[in-house]
Image: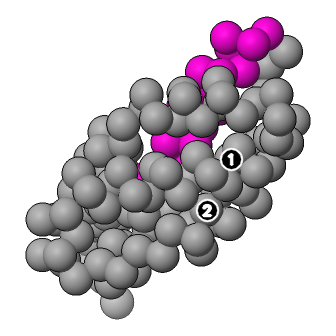
Amino acid sequence: MNHSSPKEYTYNNKTQINKKTLNVQNKLKQKTQENSQKKNKNEGVHKYFRNGIFRKRLFEIYDNLSDTKPIEELVEQGAQRACKEIVINRVNHIFKNNIKINPDQIAEEVSLEFPYHKIPNHIKDARRFFVATVCNITAKKISTYIENK
């Protein structure tokens, strides 16, 4: 049995609750910081691979073939081209981390994830959308290969 006065008892309970709350808050802060560091690292890897893609080649694919082939084939060809560009421009990183990239598989995954319904009607906007989306999705797929290693 506790022989403290009601004021002391209330103060002690509040102090214990505050300590527990602070511990929980500190743990949450720590997890949030770890998650943000991981997220920043993943974004950095994604950006690193995205910047390894020579966009002019994707623009050429779109410009030369948009009238003759369906957009699904353009997306696949663009993704394969983007994979090859990454392999060429980021060869040291790929070999150093022993990453196996299968352009056909990635192209298939990109074509499944590509948001076809969001393609703008205006030709220039559609062209930019095509290139940016293919670059982003391809880089994201390759960076997930690294995360899973």
Query: Mark 2 falls on what kind of element?
Result: helix
Disc with the residue nearer the chain's start (1 vs 2): 1
Identify the residue under disc 2. Answer: 107
Range shown magenta = 122-139
Position of residue 137 in the picture relative to residue 55 (left or right): right
Mark on residue 135?
none
The quadrant where residue 146 appears: bottom left
Position of residue 70 in the picture relative to residue 53 (left or right): right
- In-front residue for pair 115/105: 105
Residue 61 lies, in percent from the top left, at 60, 35
- In-front residue for pair 1/21: 21
Determine the residue positioned at 50% across, 68% down: 103
Magenta span has 19? no
**Above-or-below relation of 7 to 142:** above
Determine the residue positioned at 19% across, 63% down: 91
Identify the residue under disc 1. Answer: 75
